[in-house]
């Protein structure tokens, strides 16, 4: 069982002897209370290439102290999101399955192992308000770090050079040497206090000679010192403010982060997680397609193709998640004494199909091709594939052209769908219109920081039209599924009359969507 909270803290080194009573001068602090001292013993885990550390992620198993257990810390807005699991969740050397799943998108399937062993002697003081509530904790730490298997980590984590290649041939690679690093630091972690308290605490500690460490976090400090890791590379130059290139890179980075964050939830089959991951994959693909004129397509077209494959790989799990919710509820609303049993049977059928489809989706997420896609997306973010002249154009002008093209495409497909005769051809035309309105809506989302109310209004109306077309597509998918469920029930000797009634429900849903289509389409005017 895990718990999650947002960690907000400031860390400084070189503070020297700390007089806790002076902390009473901080905002809203009325009392400083010494808490029991702690001796902490932590083993940190990462891949040999330090893939977690490179993203500011730490994973450890720590005994001792008031919050002993497994801790996974991930970057988050305003601090770090910490996931906590009890010690019993995993034995030393064996990362708990849930935590391993949460970092799979970052490790890309590489094995996790111990990389450092830290022992910390901690002196703690609580900063209390006038009601005795804890505003923050001040921890003075003396840290001894043992970095494990130094040569192996250095070889894997650092770029290859002739000197280190020669050292590896000399026999040090793969050894079990360690490095010992010692330092002291002061951490102020916010509890019920506010950001002003953290800022004031940092100013006071700086006045005592403290400074922000060159590396963030204890593991980064230990490994950076022991392995002589170079500093993190500077981010790529940002495109000019207000340019089409800035618009693209901002949206690209946002959606890559969302994709990585939803990976763990999708693997765990959390409600709607597969849908969020699939939608994010579509947003990224549409972003690459809509901006092809200013991108190096030799780099972006293969990524767009693999994003389409990812979307398809998740389709079955998402479809059956929707069907498992909708069909039993629809069966329960039918009149007649036999329909409660029908609802239970349909629920059992769809639960089994969803489980099988989700298992297949997770298997796809463990393929090398998926990890290569994530690597390629990281590459696009690190070195944006922009064509200089075109990406320097004003974002508003570029977005107006993009959204104009997307709306024209949508208008043509809507006309085809409305005029198509009843049957499979119209179902296909409706689905094509749905994909077009989704692409136009995604373009409007990208334009929000630059076009304001106009983009917001277009997005809202596109979402309404997408809802109508989506309801039609859901009914079409359900009709096809019901035929298969009925055939399965027949083979098992069950009554299939109720499946016919459910099929009629889908016919009515599709007809209702067709009736709503003209008015929803008219409201969506060109951008």
Image: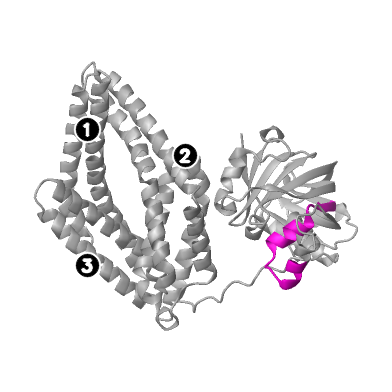
Q: Which residue is mark 1?
A: 483
| Residue beneath the point at 43% across and 81% down | 392
Bin the neighbour count of mark 1 within 10 Å (Cα to Cα): few under 14, some 14-19, many 20 and up: some
| Residue highlighted by disc 3 | 408
Mark with earlier residue (1, 2): 2
Which residues fall within the magenta stretch? 141-166
| Left-right relation of 154 to 268 | right
Residue 94, position as x, y percentages in the image: 68, 39
Q: Position of residue 342 (x, y in %)?
A: 27, 22
Residue lying at 50% horizontally and 48% vertically, measured from the top left: 263
Which of labels 1 and 2 is toward the front? Answer: 1
Gap between marks 3 and 1, in whole Å?
A: 37 Å
Give the CA distance from mark 3 to mark 2.
37 Å
Secondary structure type for disc 2: loop
Residue at point 36% right, 33% down?
353
Residue indicated by mark 2: 269
Instruction: Based on the picture, tell me whether residue 317 belongs to the magenta stretch.
Output: no
Examine the rendering and report whether any part of residue 101 can be seen: yes
Q: SS of the residue at dot 1?
A: helix
């Amino acid at each position: 069982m895990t718990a999650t909270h947002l960690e907000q803290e400031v860390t400084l080194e070189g503070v020297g002897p700390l007089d806790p009573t002076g902390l009473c001068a901080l905002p809203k602090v009325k009392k400083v209370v010494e808490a029991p001292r702690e001796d902490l013993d932590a083993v940190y885990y990462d891949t040999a290439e330090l893939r977690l550390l490179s993203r500011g992620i730490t994973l450890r198993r720590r005994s001792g102290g008031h919050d002993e257990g497994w801790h996974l810390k991930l970057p988050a807005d305003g601090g770090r999101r910490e996931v906590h699991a009890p010690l019993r969740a995993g034995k030393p050397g064996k990362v708990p399955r849930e935590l391993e799943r949460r970092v799979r998108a970052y490790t890309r399937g590489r094995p996790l192992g111990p990389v450092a062993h830290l022992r910390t002697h901690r002196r703690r003081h609580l900063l209390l308000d006038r009601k005795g509530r804890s505003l923050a904790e001040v921890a003075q730490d003396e840290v001894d770090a043992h970095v494990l298997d130094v040569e192996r980590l250095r070889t894997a984590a650092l770029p290859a050079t002739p000197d280190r290649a020669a050292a590896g041939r000399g026999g040090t690679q793969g050894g079990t040497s360690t490095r010992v690093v010692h330092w002291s630091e002061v951490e102020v972690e916010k509890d019920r206090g506010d950001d002003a308290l953290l800022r004031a605490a940092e100013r006071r500690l700086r006045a005592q000679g403290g400074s922000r460490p060159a590396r963030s976090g204890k593991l980064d400090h230990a490994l950076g010192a022991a392995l002589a890791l170079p500093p993190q590379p500077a981010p790529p130059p940002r495109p000019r403010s207000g340019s089409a290139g800035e618009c693209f890179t901002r949206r690209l980075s946002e959606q890559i982060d969302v994709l990585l964050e939803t990976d763990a939830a999708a693997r765990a089959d959390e409600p709607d997680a597969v849908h969020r991951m699939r939608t994010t994959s579509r947003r990224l693909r549409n972003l690459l397609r809509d901006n092809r004129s200013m991108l190096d397509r030799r780099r972006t077209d293969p990524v767009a193709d693999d994003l389409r494959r990812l979307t398809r790989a998740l389709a079955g799990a998402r479809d059956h998640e929707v069907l498992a919710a909708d069909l039993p509820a629809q069966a329960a609303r039918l009149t007649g004494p036999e329909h409660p049993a029908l609802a239970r049977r349909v629920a059992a059928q769809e639960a089994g199909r969803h489980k099988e489809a989700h298992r297949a989706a997770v298997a796809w997420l463990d393929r090398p091709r998926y990890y290569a896609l994530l690597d390629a997306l990281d590459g696009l973010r690190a070195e944006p594939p922009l064509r200089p002249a075109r990406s320097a154009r004003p974002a508003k002008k570029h977005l107006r052209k993009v959204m104009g093209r997307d709306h024209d495409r949508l208008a043509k497909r809507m006309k085809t769908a409305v005029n198509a005769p009843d049957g499979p051809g119209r179902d296909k035309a409706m689905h094509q219109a749905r994909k077009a309105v989704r692409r136009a809506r995604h373009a409007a989302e990208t334009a929000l920081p630059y076009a304001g109310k106009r983009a917001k209004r277009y997005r809202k109306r596109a979402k309404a039209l997408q809802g109508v077309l989506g309801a039609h597509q859901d009914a079409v998918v359900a009709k096809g599924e019901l035929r298969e469920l009925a055939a399965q029930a027949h083979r098992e000797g069950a009554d299939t009359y109720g499946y016919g009634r459910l099929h009629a429900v889908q016919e009515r849903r599709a007809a209702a969507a067709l009736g709503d289509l003209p008015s929803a389409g008219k409201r969506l005017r060109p951008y």
